[in-house]
């Protein structure tokens, strides 16, 4: 028997890390809204424990890693925006740079 993972356009597998300040912390998988976003949690990694096909009653904790299958666009939208970095302004030297001829 040969098994294949057939993927539709726009769907794929990704790992989502639940950071300590995430809205998901303290919610069950059922309350998380992932299913509503067409995201299925395949495994939940918590420390050294791996929970395959976790139930909706599993409560999410900080640093949980979720291996998910679903809409890639939805999973990308869960990545927090990076803070904008201020552009570095370099000070000009006090003396002009020599011109090489």
Image (cartoon, rainbow, N blue to C red):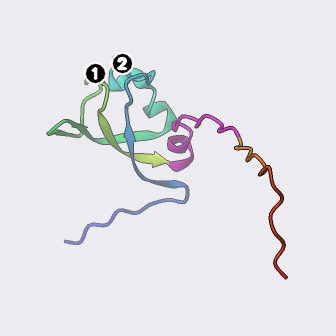
Q: Label 2 to label 1, Cα distance in Å?
A: 5 Å
Measuring 37% from the left and 37% from the top, which residue is drawn there? 17
Frontmost residue, 46 versus 13: 46
Q: Is residue 48 left or right of residue 62?
A: left
Q: Residue at x 74, y 44 (%)?
A: 89
Give the labeled residue for mark 2: 27
Of the 4 image quadrants, the one containing the C terminus is: bottom right
* Left or right side of 98 for 20: left
Highlighted magenta segment, given as a residue range = 72-86
In contact (CB < 8 Å): disc 2 and disc 1: yes
Place of residue 56 in the rendered image (x, y in percent of width and height, measured from the top left): 30, 26
Q: Circle 1 sits on which residue?
A: 59
Query: Which is more toward the observer, 83 or 51?
Result: 83
Using the rendered view, name the quadrant where residue 82 is placed. Answer: top right
Residue at 55% over, 60% down: 9
**How packed is label 1: few (under 14 Cα within 10 Å), some, or many (20 or more)?**
some
> Image check: 16 left or right of 65?
right
Residue 74 on the magenta span: yes
């Amino acid at each position: 028997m040969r098994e294949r993972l057939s993927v539709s356009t726009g769907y794929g597998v990704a790992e989502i890390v639940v950071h300590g300040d995430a809205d998901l912390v303290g919610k069950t998988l059922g309350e998380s809204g992932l299913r509503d976003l067409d995201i299925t949690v395949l495994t939940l990694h918590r420390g050294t424990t791996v929970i395959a096909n976790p139930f909706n009653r599993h409560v999410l904790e900080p640093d949980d890693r979720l291996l998910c299958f679903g809409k890639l666009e939805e999973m990308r939208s869960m990545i927090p925006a990076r803070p904008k970095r201020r552009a570095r302004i370099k000070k000009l030297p006090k003396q002009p740079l020599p011109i090489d001829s």
